[in-house]
Amino acid sequence: MLRVVVLVSGGGTNLQAIIDGVRDGRVTGTEIVGVISNNPGVKSLDRAEAAGIFHTCISPKAFPERADFHRALLEQIDALSPDLIVLAGFLVRIPEELIERYDGRIINIHPSLIPSFCGVGYYGLKVHEKALERGVRITGATVHFVNAGMDEGPIIAQKAVAVEEDDTPEILQKRVMEQAEWILLPQAIDDIANGRLSIEGGKVRRKG
Ligand code: GRF
């Protein structure tokens, strides 16, 4: 059983897609053993509560130093003994030590076709604002392994989404979530849980 810890910051629609996938049997061999938010009182935590999943908030604001926050986050993650850590709208830069300790076992969902519209400053609605500003006709989402860079890890899967006339950032964000993110992330977890996907030597390996 793949033990999964999900790191969140806000609404948690990607978390919900994973919860629903496990519940509906589209994601097998997987147990979400914990949800950790850096923000208190967000809908992600309500979603975990409703699903009976352990959840907690570890906020950087609660610590005098960043290193103290990193230590608390690592301790909580280690205590859950995850096989996989999923960043589902987690808007805090994760500590190097976490990436080293869980090398090859952290994945992230990003709401664009990396390498477009990614990197420092590209998160949430901002990504879609920039896509509309540039006038791209196709955007989408990417799920990738996490390395020390920002949105630079090996790509697992991508899904294209059409940009429509008169799209606002909010409308485009919703379409990318519905047509790409909420499909890609559960699928990647199911592939990892069932041995169809791994990372070896920094390269994504697919089997079967
Ligand atoms: C999503 O667009 C995700 O791609 C990005 O942040 C947003 C989080 O949304 N990383 P939610 O919290 O999963 O609803």
Image: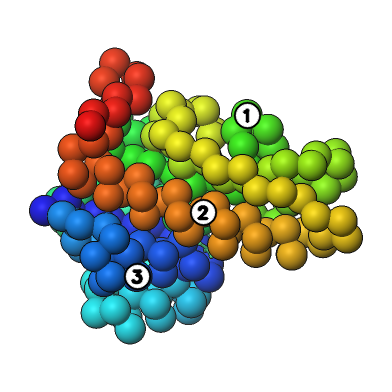
State the colouring used for the structure image.
rainbow
- Determine the residue located farthest toward the bottom in the rendered image: 50
Q: Residue drawn at (52%, 39%), measured in percent from left and top?
A: 158
The dot on residue 181 is: 2
* Secondary structure under the numbered disc 1 in the rendered image: loop
- Mark 2 element type: helix
Of 186 and 82, nearer the camera is 186
- Measure the C-alpha gap from mark 2 to mark 1: 16 Å
Q: Is residue 61 above or below residue 112?
A: below
Question: What residue appears at the point 35 percent right and 19 percent down from the top-left corner?
Answer: 203
Q: Position of residue 110 (x, y in %)?
A: 55, 45
Task: Please state if 48 lies on the left or on the right of 38 as rendered.
Answer: left
Sooner in the amino-acid sequence: mark 3 or mark 1 = 3
Location of the C terminus by quadrant is top left
Do callouts 2 and 3 mark residues in contact (Cβ within 8 Å)?
no
Tell me residue 41's x, y (percent). 48, 78
Measure the alpha-carbon separation of dots 2 and 3: 14 Å
- What is the three-letter code of the residue carrying label 3? Asp
Pick whichever of labels 2 and 3 is earlier in the sequence: 3
Q: Is residue 124 above or below residue 118?
A: below
Ligand 1 location (quadrant): bottom right
State the image coordinates of residue 55 (x, y, percent, origin top left). 30, 71
Q: Identify the residue under disc 3.
A: 20
Q: Amino acid at mark 2?
A: Glu
Can residue 125 be seen by looking at this rendering?
yes
Image coordinates of residue 195 in percent, x first then y, are 18, 38
Give the labeled residue for mark 1. Answer: 115
